[in-house]
Image (spheres, rainbow, N blue to C red):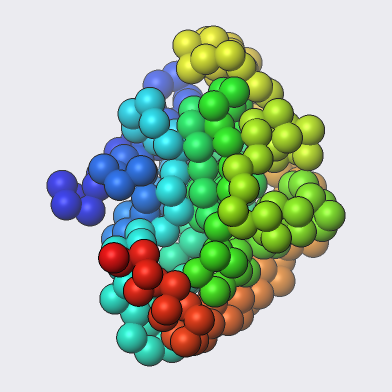
Amino acid sequence: MPEAGNLQSTITDGVAQIEFFHPSGNSFPAVMLQALTLEFEKLGKDESVKIIVLKSGGDGAFCAGASFDELLTVENIDQGTRFFSGFALVINAMRKCPKLIIGRIQGKTVGGGVGLAAACDYTFATESALVKLSELAIGIGPFVIAPAVERKIGLAAFAELTLCAHEWKSAYWAKEKGLYTCLFKNSDAMDDEIRNFTGILSRYNPEALLELKKIFWQGTEHWESLLYERAAVSGRLVLSDFSRNALGALRK
């Protein structure tokens, strides 16, 4: 998928690594969101896979969220709902995946990228992994990813992150609130620890890990419908005069 970016996975000693890349800040067009959803489903069924690591390519942003170029093409509520359902599909796939998912966040993450980090079961990040939810600036809100983010950092921190749509929060803020589990000075130190950690986890009883994952995600079964209902809210709001004017200003 050269124009849409690319997504690939490798499996080594029971550890699967999914890497996604897009030239626009590792953003996600719909086709890549669909591919990521299918990859989690496939690896979840692969008995050779014990642990999954999610990472993005390059040394820049971890993820700029959904593709802004595609957002600009939304013309009606059905298109809008489908557009915002992309991250609903991915988050639900991560939630239901029977393997633990480890997030590797090496740089800034925005919008849906924050949702991806929140949907991981354990996260490693560098000091440059700043976070922002900028959706209010274009007249919508982080409705689809809200349940995943709130589950990790709590309602008060989610409110702070959402309402400060103009402001980057530091990686230290994200760790203090629970979005990141471990923080490192640089990617090399982070990658060393990820290798050690996943190597240990991959040797544990997979049935025990599965039962733990069920506990981690207990009470989220209603997300199967909730996230799509939230996608419809964003799909409607993005057609508002406010959003159209904000998006038009960004085009200039």
- Can residue 134 be seen here? The reply is yes
| 63 horizontally vs 50: left or right | left
Up the image or down, 101 lies above or below 215; here it is above
Return the x and y of residue 23 as percentages of the image width and height.
26, 43
Return the x and y of residue 192 as percentages of the image width and height.
52, 10
Residue 128 sits in quarter = top right
Up the image or down, 94 lies above or below 12; here it is below
- Can residue 42 be seen here? The reply is no
Residue at image coords 43%, 48%:
64
Return the x and y of residue 61 as percentages of the image width and height.
42, 36
**Number of marks in picture:** 0
| 55 horizontally vs 227: left or right | left
Q: Nearer the viewer, residue 232 or 9?
A: 232
Return the x and y of residue 195 as percentages of the image width and height.
52, 15
Residue at image coords 60%, 43%:
168
Residue 148 sits in quarter = bottom right
Up the image or down, 70 lies above or below 198; here it is below
Q: Nearer the viewer, residue 16 or 67?
A: 67
Up the image or down, 196 lies above or below 61; here it is above
> Quadrant where the C terminus lies?
bottom left
| 251 horizontally vs 53: left or right | left
Residue at image coords 51%, 43%:
109
